[in-house]
Amino acid sequence: MLVDDLWDNWLVVLAPTVLAGVIFWWVMRAILHADRTERKVYAKIEAEERAKLEQR
């Protein structure tokens, strides 16, 4: 019975840490993905504006 309590305690102790790590990973992934997308869109807009200036 003591071993069962030990495994239950490990689960209770480690679960919040693992959950916090997964949430942190997910948030950082979302931030980096948004930044990558924003850079692509900005580069496209810059290229369009430069093309407009060259035509003048």
Image: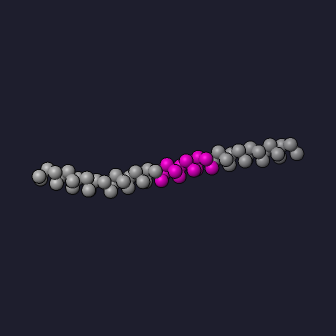
The residue nearer to you, when weighing 12 against 47, is 12
Q: On the rendered image, what quadrant is the C terminus found in?
A: top right
Indicate the quadrant where residue 50 lies: top right
* Residue ranking furthest to the right: 56
Tell me if 8 is positioned left or right of 24 in this view.
left
Q: On screen, 16 above or below 43? A: below
Compare residues 56 and 21 and report the one nearer the observer.
21
- Give the residue drawn at x 55%, y 47%: 33
- In the image, is 33 to the left or to the right of 44? left
Residue 21, position in %: x, y? 38, 52
Q: Position of residue 55 (x, y in %)?
A: 86, 43
In this picture, which residue range is highlighted in magenta?
27-38
Q: Where does residue 40 sit, x and y in percent of width and height?
A: 65, 45
Which residue is depicted at the point 53% across and 52% down?
31
Tell which residue pokes out farthest to the left in this image. 1
Residue 29 included in the magenta stretch of the image: yes
Q: Quadrant of residue 13?
A: bottom left
Q: Is residue 23 left or right of residue 48?
A: left
Residue drawn at 20 percent across, 51 percent down:
7
Choose between 51 and 14: the one closer to the eye. 14
Q: Main secondary structure of the magenta part?
A: helix
Residue 38 at x, y percent in the picture: 63, 50
Q: How is the image coloured?
A: one colour
The structure residue drawn at horizontal position 43% and vertical position 54%, both measured from the top left corner, is 24
For residue 11: magenta? no
